[in-house]
Amino acid sequence: MVPPTRIPAAFLALSLALMGSSCQIPSATTQPIPPGVTRGADGSLSYDTVAPSGPRDTISFWDGSAGDGPPRIHLSRAEQTAYFFRGSHLVGKSWLSTGDASHQTPAGKFTILQKNKWHKSSRYGAAVDSAGNVVVAELDKKKDPLPPGTQYEGAKVTNFMRLTWDGVGMHAGFLPGYPASHGCIRMPMQMSEHFFNAVELGTPVTVD
């Protein structure tokens, strides 16, 4: 058997690429934090950033108008846009990144089940060592084993507005310009603030 230290780096990189990003390999060495994830002053991991090199947001706006009725939201996966209405009046739009091909955001009629400004994911996050170093940068707690000596750290998803009890919701997040989430609906931070402050428990949300 060839010792691991003698495996050519180019061969290892190609092998990992072919296996896909969803396959996690326990490692004793730390990994860099992936794009769109930051570590805050308190040490927590967060998906609250917009891709520095991503496309410019030309969709979002919020006018704060009172409207003529209760709030409701329409999310279009095809347009990657959320529309916020009060009655018949459109008071805001938000750019989105919904679920990718392997984790599609479900279509249907929902309501806001929960609001949690400082929510942390119970499923998606990272494996960190005792010093807080990231060992596995993107981990699905239901599928990926924790490497020895590490613990799970859920990703922080600010302004979380829950749509399903199995984890789908709207929140501030990484926006690369295409569907890229694990099923949630990512929004720019400012727009997630507007939506979070304006919705109530029970606010209807339609996803198509």
Image: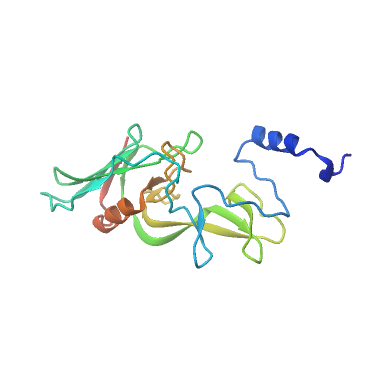
Front-most of residues 126 and 106: 126
Q: Residue furthest left?
A: 68
Near-viewer residue (96 or 113): 96
Q: Most extreme residue toward the right, as rendered?
A: 1
Residue 81 percent across, percent down from the top left:
31, 39
Q: In this view, does 119 lie above or below 205?
A: below
Q: Where is residue 50 in the image (x, y as percent from the top left)?
A: 42, 48
For residue 20, what is the image quadrant? Answer: top right
Picture mark count: 0
The residue under the point 43% across, 60% down is 119
Q: Where is residue 106 in the image (x, y as percent from the top left)?
A: 40, 39
7 sits to left or right of 144: right
What colour scheme governs how the chains and residues are painted in the rendered image of this protein? rainbow
Can residue 134 be seen in the rendering of this structure? yes
Residue extending farthest front: 53
Q: Where is residue 73 in the image (x, y as percent from the top left)?
A: 26, 45
Residue 145 horizontal side relative to residue 72, left or right: right
Residue at point 75%, 39% (across, down): 9
Quarter holding the C terminus?
Answer: top left
In the image, 145: left or right of 80?
A: right
Q: Which quadrant, please, contains the N terminus?
A: top right
On the question of residue 112 being in view, the answer is no
Residue drawn at (43%, 51%) of the image: 49
- Which is more toward the observer, 131 or 71? 131
